[in-house]
Amino acid sequence: MRDEARGLRDEGHGRAASGPVTGLVERDAMVLRAAAKIAELDSQEEGIVFGRLDFDDGYTYRIGRVGVRDEDREPLVVDWRAPAAAPFYRATPGEPLGVDRRRVIVCAGPKVVALDDEVLSAKEIDGVVGEGALLRSLTRERGEHMRDIVTTIQREQDEAIRAPAHGVTLITGGPGTGKTQVALHRAAYLLYTDRGRFADGRVLVVGPSTVFTEYIGRVLPGLGEDSVHLRAIGELFDGVTATRRDPHDVARTKGDLRMVRVLTDLAWDTPPGAPDRLRTLKPDDLAEARLEVRRRCEARGVKPNAGRAVAARVLSERLDGAEIPDAFLDAWWPPLTPQDVLPAQHGEWTVDDVPLLDELAEILGPVPARTAPAPQWQLRELRSGTRVAETFVLSLSLNDGWQLFAPGLRTPMAASGQALDGADSWGAQRWAAAIILREGHKVTGWRDGFDPYGEEGYVPVLAEPLPVAEAEAPVEDVYLHVILDEAQDLSPMECRMIARRAAHASMTIVGDLGQATHPLAAASWPELVQRLGKRGARTLDLPTGYRVPQVIADFAARALAPGIEPTRSFRPGGTLRVRQVDDLAAAVAQERRRGQERWVVIAPDHLAAHLDALPVSQVKGLEFDRVVLVEPAEIVAAEPRGMSRLYVALTRAVAELVVLHRRPLPAPLAG
Ligand SMILES: Nc1ncnc2c1ncn2[C@@H]1O[C@H](COP(=O)(O)OP(=O)(O)OP(=O)(O)O)[C@@H](O)[C@H]1O
């Protein structure tokens, strides 16, 4: 397959650059496709085969990260997402699906280092080897980033990953049940099943924070998928990256649906710095005129940014038909961006501001593009053809052959990729015309001119004057599938922001009501689904925890909200220590010194900086080998859903949890 891809690339490069313009486009497409394939194959070398299924009818096949076929198109390795690979994840001794033996092949680079076999039939099978693949995977060295689980996906997880794409799929489960993993593998699965539909950024995955997206960011590329958009909630509005959250009381106000009304009033309000007099019109008259403009616009569904003409008419009527100067309108009814209306407080927007900015974008409407005509100087130069400054120019450099310069650039056009040697001026013009056409301009003739270095050259006469560079119209995010992780925490305003992006999309909603900490979190899943503008969902529950050992899970479950089932844990081992201390900082330092192990300290937000710890509000979705958790009572006291916040913090440790407290433990933990 590599050879084939390389052949394709070389053939692409070989297509004559001087041929018809379609040749160039084709060449680019071919080279790009081949490069993508080569990159995919290179990235999947490790573990290209990781499984084997032996069926009771003697049939055997191998499972891998990508499908591999021989020269006759016969499958050598089945892609893990193909229907044929499903028994690898679903067969159990109770329901073997015809599988006699499932083998997991563990590789380091191209070398097989271990085999794990599981016999699913009652028959005697020779040569069974290895320990449980899942256990091995759970106990191996962990890195800073989440790694994929393709080799050990469990049955219920597989069912959630392969649920149909359409409609709404709700995946619930306690901490560490693999919800995030399932969400990411599901994205890869959807791309595999319907690449034509979902490729090119049509799948959006939303996570709670940038720390979290950073942590999980390597999983999809590791699965060979790099076209999925992965965003934190604070990154959904273009142009703003928010990482800090507001205190819970502020978050409660900002997350409330009543903000829509507040923002609407703000959007129609007088912008700061607007003039307050126009001829005979005094401040009160202008304020009244503004209300009238709003009334008329709203009656016709015109948004503020499209209201300039209405504003001009209303003012003109009040000045006996006088024309309103552009300069006045520019200041009194300027086009506004959401950031103009809601400037950042203390120099930065918070995550809770992002849905408000997004709402404002909807209320204000797009900022009208100024359709500036080509300026006079440009038309003049295009007509005279004697200067280069702002148009293309083709010149002959003694050392480098024919070169094409683009408007405003002092270097030859990078897009053309090369200079043309050994051609006469006619051949060079044909070559240049093809490249200029690719840039969107038709050449109708050539005149004499100069290149940016003053060398004589040819300036193309273009069918239309070269337009002044305009800001490109923003590409609308049309997503066809939206995956929400930690969805239990979305406020009504955040749901509106997501619903706008998911209007035409099917959805996967992933979360755990037991970990809901937002003051306006939905009380139930149907309520959340409704907030997202959807109806009904197929629900899949993940019952088994793979992160937290049972001792820690049992302790954490004491903080679990009533009515929610605790998770049964698969992970063995684990230790838990709870210590009351006099001096928290000294105790933390002492824990940090213990052994060579890496400890992560989680503390109430207001103590975090002082203890050089992670603020408890930022650990959702993350996991660490060893956790020191400081002062649970203050975590609980800090916010209305403090107990759920504590539950999140208690369920981050994979191996060891130490709880340090000076104040008495919260009642449920002490019990
Ligand atoms: N089938 C599996 N094989 C190997 N490891 C797994 C499997 N399922 C889950 N894990 C591991 O368990 C840990 C928890 O998974 P994940 O973070 O997806 O859980 P979660 O349900 O999203 O947790 P939380 O609710 O706390 O965010 C991760 O380290 C993940 O790699």
Image (tube, grey):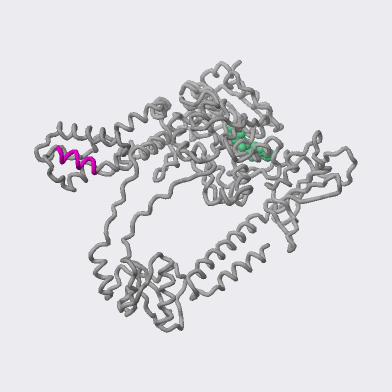
Query: Residue lying farthest left?
Result: 280
- Up-down relation of residue 315 to residue 256 (above or below): below
Which residue does the image show at 48% across and 76% down from the upper left? Answer: 18
Residue 53 percent coordinates (x, y): 79, 47
Which span is picked out in magenta?
A: 309-317
Residue drawn at the location 52% of the way across and 38% of the way down: 207
The residue positioned 56% from the left and 65% from the top of the image is 31
Say left or right for 408 vs 583: left
Q: Is residue 418 above or below residue 497?
A: below
Q: Is residue 654 left or right of residue 257?
A: right
> So how many labels did they put on this image?
0
Residue 158, percent from left and from top: 68, 39
Given residues 329 and 54, the one toward you in this image is 329
In the image, is 17 to the left or to the right of 41?
left
Q: Nearer the viewer, residue 519 or 374?
A: 374
**In magenta segment, residue 316:** yes
Q: Quadrant of residue 119?
A: top right
Q: Quadrant of the C terminus?
A: top right
Question: For the N terminus, which image quadrant?
Answer: bottom right
Asked whether the viewer can see residue 105, the reply is yes
Residue 596 seen from this side: no
Of all residues shown, which one is farthest toward the right?
Answer: 124
**Where residue 327 sits: x, y (%)?**
18, 47
Quarter residue 142 falls in: top right
Would you say residue 600 sits in the magenta stretch? Answer: no
Image quarter for ligand 1: top right
